[in-house]
Image: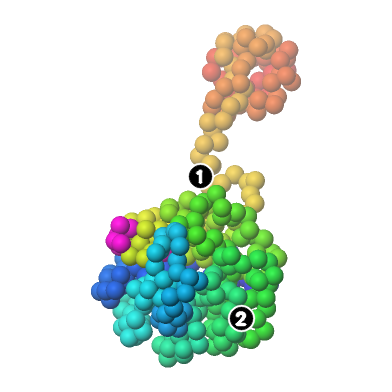
Amino acid sequence: MTEQYITIDGRKIGPHYPPYIIAELSANHNGDINRAFAIMAAAKAAGADAIKLQTYTQDTITMDCDSDEFQIKGGLWDGQSLYQLYKTAHMPWEWHKPLFAKAKELGITIFSSPFDFTAVDLLEQLDAPAYKIASFEVIDLPLIKRVAQTGKPMIISTGMANQDEIKLAIKTAKDNGCNELVVLHCVSGYPAPAEQYNLRTIADISQRFNVLAGLSDHTIDNATAVVSVAFGACVIEKHVTLDRNGGGADDSFSLEPTELAQLCTDSKTAWQAMGKVNYERTAAEQGNVQFRRSLYIVKDIAAGEMLTSDNVRSIRPGFGLAPKHYDVVLGKVAKNAIVRGTALSFELIE
């Protein structure tokens, strides 16, 4: 692929840099801005690179309608209408400015997922450094076009989208000025079963669409996210809360602070462990070479005596001839007497 990295708020993101960890605050503020502040502080302390908001109101994302089509049946939010859910879950727009100020105070990057043009306008006023297109909006090409026209880096989630929809979203972004793009593989289940994640798709996204790729993870632990690094994920997004049992719309499938800290540590370790193709001896191995097997004299041998399987063995340590010479030395005779425990060398035999 041609793009080796993008930059968000001064942080380079790509395969040659540690995974970029986004802590999704989403609805986990539970109606309390101080809880939102606390989640942001916890994300910073855990080592996350960015905090992400969702910018919509119940009136910009849906409409108040009693029609059956607007009712949620089954799943995490069963029994609510879309309007009721989003009224409770949305981030009040008047909170955005203090949240951006808090992020600056904490020293953590903040950006958001806009869900309509007015949300983009608000975020532009706040000088958001990047934008995220949510999975449910990947088919909203006018929104993608509007975001692309800001010229800011864009991250697009692909939950529920097929190849053609992903291709069209990427084309719309690039055709309208987006030069820095990451596409996140995603399963839009809440929570999502790990066995449905098909992480091999991450590398295919990168190759097929010539973009940087990452993971938006809705599983309930970190295993899927950490493994995704091995498949080329340079961005990992996880929902974050203070308490998984807090009762909020997204709390139940979110990471708590200690889990987020573990994700930040483990994903970086996984990235470091990927390294490069290497068959050379590493620095950590150098001191242990002496403990490999080699050929030793295990019984005293007189001058002129033949070397046999009774007096020569392959044992540790590794100061003698390599074991590959075992068949060669058997049947040879000793030039001089050889004491038991001597590392065998060709100089000792005829």
* Residue 141 numbered mark, or none: 2
Q: Secondary structure at mark 2?
A: helix
Residue 25: quadrant of the picture:
bottom left
User: Is residue 241 one of those drawn in magenta?
Assistant: yes
Residue at the (66%, 25%) spot, across then down: 323
Q: Is residue 214 above or below residue 329?
A: below
Q: Decide whether the magenta segment is chiefly helix, strand or loop.
A: loop
Tell me what residue is drawn at x 41 percent, y 71 percent. Answer: 81
Q: Residue 18 in the image: x percent, y percent?
A: 50, 63
Amino acid bearing label 1: Ala
Q: How many marks?
A: 2
Q: Which residue is mark 1?
A: 284
Name the spot of residue 313 as percent of width and height, x first: 61, 17
Horizontal side of 250 relative to 311 (left or right) equals left
Q: Does residue 244 show up?
A: yes
CB-based contact (under 8 Å), mark 2 and mark 1: no
Any magenta on residue 98? Answer: no
Which quadrant is home to the C terminus?
top right
Residue that appears at 43% across and 72% down: 82
- Residues rendered magenta in the picture: 238-247
Callout 1 secondary element: helix
Q: Return the residue nearer the eye: 47 or 74.
A: 74
The crowding category of the residue bearing disc 2, from other C-alpha atoms within 10 Å (few below 14, some 14 to 19, many at least 20), is: some
Q: Quadrant of residue 99?
A: bottom left
The residue lying at 61 percent from left, 67 percent from top is 161
Label 2 and label 1: CA atoms lie apart by 51 Å
